[in-house]
């Protein structure tokens, strides 16, 4: 249908950014873009190589993951995206990848410590790693529950999804989001770079200290404050 | 001969995927494709750079490694491929590389632990590292014995070559296989990525736990169960 | 204005070298070029992707960071560049990146030890890592103070900015400079490579010794001495 | 002169392989090719970027490093190449790079242990790291003495330059050689890959054992024996 053209185009272009940024191998990633008026989102079809994608191959699904338009099967992670759209009303796009360094941190089960200003320019605290799900959640509707695992982690830590636009799911991989697909993909790229540098920082100095509070606060204001001016 | 055109073309295209995926330096890798009706397989010629390959340069050999068609010498690993085709009747293609991270694990002599869902989406247990061969095996028909070393490892551990389509040969390098060349090459790419992330995971957290059983089971069913739906 | 064409062109070309050399992700870096006669410098506009840059988008500012020409906002690091131009009269260009390995060293808070001749061909001592700024400096005019933090580190250690053309700012990232933009960008590339090899060197041998004095002296003379002949 | 056309062309093409193989940053490397009849060799000019090279820019020098033909200054490492040609009569080409991993091993001061068959296919023992030169050698004719440092290391260890075609010079970087430029450059690529995998192997398993003797012997015969058949 014509009315979904815009989100299909945006989702297509954003999905194509993942291999361009070196964030995916084969089909290990997906981007979705929501249309809040229609309460649907466009998402990558399952198992289709990036080289074979086109805007018309994007699948339109509702927040429950039910296909509204499209002949292909939607990404197997679709229900996780749907839960996030349903509960976090201000996000416009969700990205899931298995990017090398962010996934290694997720596999390690540890938050990514805030070691420098590259991190602080985007987030003013450690990047959270949600614990693995309970056996009950896993044996249930797995991808659906993954969405709740993400939201539960944010609730327990008192995090705002508008401030912290990324998470590691323990033993699994990262998810990021944003107001639109460009921002959500950008966040995946930032997360991968921050994850890589955090590992190297620890390798150089096991006792590397977290960023001092004054610097965290400054970088937060530089970007988000009333007189924000960050951009490089 | 015309009758081998199909496997020569498939072997050629699969061999060309190895440098495209960053899995080989110089000529350090080879792919073969079997024709079960003719009981022969097509394999990369020995020492020919990838840039100089063409379908007609693929060598046709029988399961003993005897050349059936072709003017070039077959890969020095040909007998290992042959043993696998002879004994594992359902595989259609074998890949051998010296890809950086998988080979480093092989050199370390350790299995690759299952640390996350990237691994679990493809294998539900650690990726095995076969021990180095006995001196007798090495001094005998070395490449032929390498095939038996692989099969012995699978037998001793009770592994199925249809479930686990990859192995590390200790002090040497990885082998992967699959129903066709596309799947066998895909497996080499997955193995390299899993090997890379397993190293980084250990560097971040020396005590990183293996994936919990419920998650392993879920990912297995997601992909292989009666209602499989995995694909991303 | 026509009179700034030359530095805008030079700044544009140097900025485009940063992604070509793999030193930046997204917009995480900037190069400026000074015109000593006019007491202004050309610098990358803030937040503009490299692919969208052109010479006419470079912003002309004075040493205080005040815009003299251009419709775009100058880089958020502009005041740091300005302080260095104002106080170090012989430098013609400044580069700031968040390149992966140099930034990891900056985050670790440690100087980069002189481990080999690659380092010694360019610097005859460890590459300094300035400590993080005091809370007072951070809460003040942050980017302006970053310039003084750099100069203070050089003063306290008795370093000459004409000899040592690079520094790590603790918890932040590197700055380099040079007589012109080509040299300043070259220095950023050298720093990243030296930072990378220093990490790997320590991983191979935690006790790797610093370069012996006679070798440091030789490499210094080879390049800077009265009969310099270095170049490869 | 026309009579040097052949070695200038060969040296040019081999030098261009260094950036293509990712072995050099900027101008950090050089290849030379010898003409045994004329007792001269062609070598990269000093400080000229690879993108600006052409066959006619190669410099022709004698074994003492004296320029025989060419307007440009020869590489600053020329005398090291000359010493090797003078004393090792069967080599046709010498390569020097500061490739990342091999240089990191050189900076660590350690031999590269033989951990696997990738190594054994090319060398049947650890890759030697020559100790740093004495202060007297450094203060003398430095690049000339570097050649003797290499040869002294081979003499002390009883190594043959026809068997082991590579060395690390402690605190400095690798040198490789071969019967012609293609082989010498190939050796630099092999060395970098072996160096990289040796580091990763140690990171996975600090106690990784050296390759067993039977396997070393087999790989040696596979390649060099009377019935050699290696090539992949």
Image: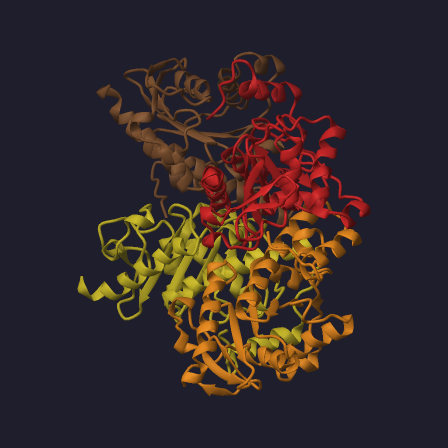
Chain colours: A red, B orange, C brown, D yellow
Residue C183 lies in quadrant: top left
Q: Is residue C5 left or right of residue B50?
A: left
| Residue D13 image point, x, y percent | 32, 60
- Depicted B107 relative to depicted C156: above or below: below
Left or right: D87 as drawn, with respect to C39: right
- Answer above or below: position of B17 versus A178: below
Of D226 and B52, which appears nearest the observer?
Answer: B52
Tell me where residue C160 sits by quadrant.
top left
Residue C162 visible from this viewpoint: yes
Farthest residue, direction left: D1
> Residue C111 appears at what percent x and percent y?
57, 33
* Number of residue marks: 0
Q: Is residue C23 visible?
A: no
**Residue at 44% from the left image edge and 74% from the top image edge:** B9
Residue sitting at x 46%, y 80%: B59
Lateral position of residue D90 relative to residue D1, left or right: right
In the picture, measured across the screen, residue A150 lies left or right of residue A22, that is right
The image position of residue D144, as x and y in percent, is 40, 54
Q: Is residue A85 above or below residue B13?
A: above
**Residue, x 27% and y 71% (percent of image)?**
D37
Specify the quadrant that holds the N terminus of chain B: bottom left
Tell me if residue C148 comes above or below residue D78 in the rendering: above
Of the pair D30 and C63, the residue shown nearer to us: C63
Residue B122, percent from left and from top: 66, 59
Q: Nearer the viewer, residue C19 or D142?
A: C19
């Amino acid at each position: 249908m014509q009315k979904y053209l815009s989100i299909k185009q945006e989702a297509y272009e954003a999905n194509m950014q993942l291999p361009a940024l070196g964030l995916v191998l084969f089909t290990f990633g997906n981007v979705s873009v929501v249309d809040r008026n229609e309460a649907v989102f466009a998402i990558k079809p399952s198992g289709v190589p990036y080289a074979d994608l086109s805007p018309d191959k994007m699948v339109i699904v509702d927040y429950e993951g039910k296909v509204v338009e499209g002949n292909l099967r939607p990404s197997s992670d679709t229900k996780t995206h749907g839960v996030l759209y349903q509960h976090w009303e201000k996000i416009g796009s969700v990205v899931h990848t298995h990017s090398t360094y962010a996934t290694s941190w997720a596999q390690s089960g540890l938050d990514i410590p805030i070691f420098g200003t590259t991190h602080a320019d985007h987030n003013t605290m450690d990047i959270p790693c949600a614990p693995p799900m309970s056996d009950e959640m896993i044996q249930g509707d797995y991808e659906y529950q993954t969405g709740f695992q993400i939201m539960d982690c944010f609730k327990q830590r008192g995090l705002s999804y508008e401030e912290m636009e990324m998470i590691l799911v323990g033993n699994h991989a990262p998810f990021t989001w944003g107001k639109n697909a460009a921002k959500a993909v950008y966040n995946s790229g930032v997360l991968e770079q921050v994850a890589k540098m955090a590992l190297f920082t620890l390798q150089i100095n096991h006792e590397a200290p977290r960023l001092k509070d004054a610097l965290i606060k400054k970088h937060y204001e530089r970007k988000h404050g009333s007189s924000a001016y960050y951009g490089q």
